[in-house]
């Protein structure tokens, strides 16, 4: 099983030391990049030492309007290009929701798993788009007046069949992948949210996504506004 390298890009102008409190649970496959300006609060040495075995980098950028944001996003693009097709995750740690538009844009350009969190938290996270749309099902209907629940049953069956036919996956993994897809069906950013959660759940989640992408496209296109 391949190991996923996780990169945390911290907007230290927008979070506090308390938001980094889970850092002592990070390990050698976690990479910390702290972006700050000379006007930012100083980080206590205890906070830095709590980053444990993770790789740490500090980036001091000019204290100008949106300077930190632009440097952080530029570096994120650099990391994605540098790591190419490696199995990596990227987490922007910031309370600034403006990053969400950049994340959506980068999702269209690459298959990388990119999320935003308001703090370093190693519990399962919703993606930025899931956070903004949590519980909001789109007011759409399926062609032919087929009920949403019936389409979910059909979708579940098609996903399980496709992943099973690809070979190499346990039944439990197939069922879990199908449940992730069905959970997001009918909601905003259906395919993108499936992409993100599969990538965050499995080492080879993006391989599974490629297998089921034609099915996702079919189900996405058949939904129309009322």
Image (tube, grey):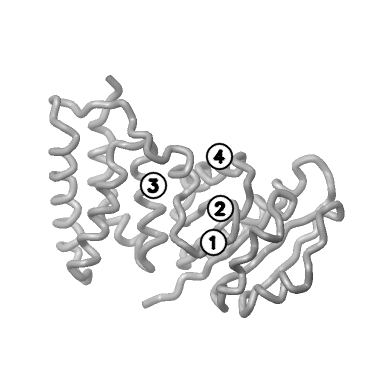
Disc assigned to residue 117? 2
- Which mark is in front, 4 or 2? 2
Residue that carries the numbered disc 3 in the rendered image: 193
**Residue 27 in the image, given as x and y percentages of width and height:** 56, 77
Residue that carries the numbered disc 4 in the rendered image: 101
Disc assigned to residue 136? none
* Cα–Cα gap, marks 2 and 1: 8 Å
* Cα–Cα gap, marks 2 and 3: 15 Å
Residue at 46% in and 42% down: 129
Which residue lies most toward the right here? Answer: 38
Q: Is residue 190 above or below residue 43?
A: above
The answer to which of marks 1 and 4 sits earlier in the sequence is 4
Q: Does residue 30 appear to the left or right of 210 in the view shown?
A: right
Looking at the rendered image, the quarter that the N terminus falls into is bottom left
Q: Is residue 112 above or below residue 109?
A: below
Disc assigned to residue 121? 1
Q: Residues within 10 Å of mark 2 (few under 14, many from 20)?
A: many
Q: Does residue 158 appear to the left or right of 91 in the view shown?
A: left
**Residue 185 in the image, given as x and y percentages of width and height:** 28, 41
Disc 1 and disc 3 in contact, CB within 8 angstroms = no
In the depicted view, which residue is nearer to us: 155 or 19? 19
The answer to which of marks 4 and 3 sits earlier in the sequence is 4
Disc 2 and disc 1 in contact, CB within 8 angstroms = yes
The answer to which of marks 1 and 3 sits earlier in the sequence is 1
**Residue 138 in the image, given as x and y percentages of width and height:** 33, 30
Looking at the rendered image, the quarter that the C terminus falls into is top left
User: What kind of element bears circle 2?
Assistant: strand
């Amino acid at each position: 099983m391949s190991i996923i390298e996780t990169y945390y890009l911290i907007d230290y102008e927008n979070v506090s030391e308390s938001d980094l409190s889970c850092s002592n649970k990070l390990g050698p496959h976690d990479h910390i990049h702290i972006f700050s300006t000379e006007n930012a609060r100083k980080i206590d040495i205890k906070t830095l030492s709590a980053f444990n075995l993770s790789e740490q980098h500090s980036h001091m950028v000019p204290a100008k309007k949106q300077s930190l944001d632009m440097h952080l996003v530029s570096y994120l693009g650099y990391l994605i290009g540098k790591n190419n097709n490696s199995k990596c995750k990227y987490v922007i740690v910031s309370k600034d929701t403006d990053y969400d538009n950049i994340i959506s844009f980068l999702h269209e350009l690459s298959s990388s798993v990119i999320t935003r969190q308001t703090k370093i938290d190693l519990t399962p996270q919703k993606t930025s788009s899931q956070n903004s749309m949590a519980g909001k099902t789109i007011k759409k209907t399926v062609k032919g007046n087929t009920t949403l629940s019936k389409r979910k049953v059909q979708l579940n069956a098609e996903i399980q069949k496709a992943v099973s036919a690809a070979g190499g996956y346990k039944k439990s993994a197939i069922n879990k992948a199908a449940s992730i897809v069905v959970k997001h069906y009918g909601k905003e950013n259906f395919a993108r949210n499936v992409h993100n959660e599969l990538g965050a759940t499995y080492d080879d989640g993006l391989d599974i996504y490629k297998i089921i992408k034609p099915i996702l496209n079919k189900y996405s296109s058949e939904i129309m506004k009322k």
